[in-house]
Image (tube, helix red, strand yellow):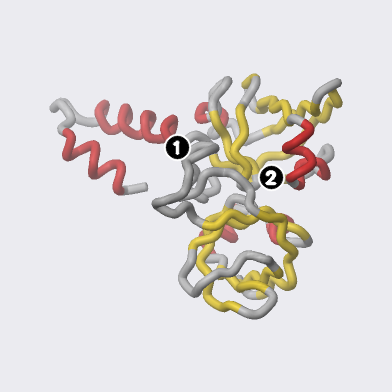
Amino acid sequence: MFTGLIREIAVVNSYLNGKLNIVSKHIAKIGDSIAVNGVCLTVIEISSSGFTVEVASETRSIIDDSKFLNRVHIEPAMQMHDRFEGHIVQGHIDCIGEVVRVEKLYTGVDYYIKVPTESIRYIIPKGSITIDGISLTVNSVYEDYFRLTIIPHTLEETLIKDYKIGTKVNLETDMFARYIEHLLKHRGSTSRSMSWGDVDNINMSY
């Protein structure tokens, strides 16, 4: 589990045959889970300059390869003793969004991001969303896009400052919105009431 708070902007050394080698200050261990631009990946090799993670074929079928080039956001998995900030992030990418409009404000920048129509129902006004691993708050939601206001501090500390019209982004929608929809669909498929055991089984399927 992650929080969506970026710990470092690392540099991609190479990305070949599903292996992503990253130059990073973070001291990783074999088997660690690390979110790279919001994607939960497992460390398979370590070196003096960083670490290598493996990108499964299922993940490669969802994300845009451009998200593993140049610089990337990284966040190690949350530890039990860590302070919880941001929001609950699984590191499971739901879809790819695209920046379609950028508006500079007096105290920040508005970004309008288009998403597949089947994903917009999981994006809630004033709710949480993860973009390239960053925990952010949604301002407004429209038919097939949503709006975010990014404050100067976040712009300074993340790669969002480089986003422009046409930039592709990894999106993880709100986990609880997906859970609720799954629960309601499951409930509608049976005439009996759901038990807490049913709820646990559904939760474990994620």
Asked if residue 72 is positioned above or below residue 131 in the image, the reply reads below
Q: Which mark is residue 169?
A: 2
Is 131 left or right of 57, judged from the image as shown? right
Side (left or right) of 186 relative to 104: left
First in sequence: mark 2 vs mark 1: 2
Residue 154 picture location, percent across and down: 73, 37
The picture quadrant where one finds residue 187 is top left
Q: Residues within 10 Å of mark 2 (few under 14, many from 20)?
A: many
The three-letter code of the residue at mark 1 reads: Met
Using residue 61 as the reference point, say whether residue 157 is left or right of it. right
Residue type at tag 2: Val
Which residue is depicted at the point 37% across and 47% down?
206
Residue indicated by mark 1: 175
Q: In terms of secondary structure, where does tag 1 sit?
A: helix
Q: Nearer the viewer, residue 27 or 108?
A: 27
Residue at horizontal 20 percent and vertical 38 percent from the top: 198
Distance Cα–Cα, label 2 vs label 1: 18 Å
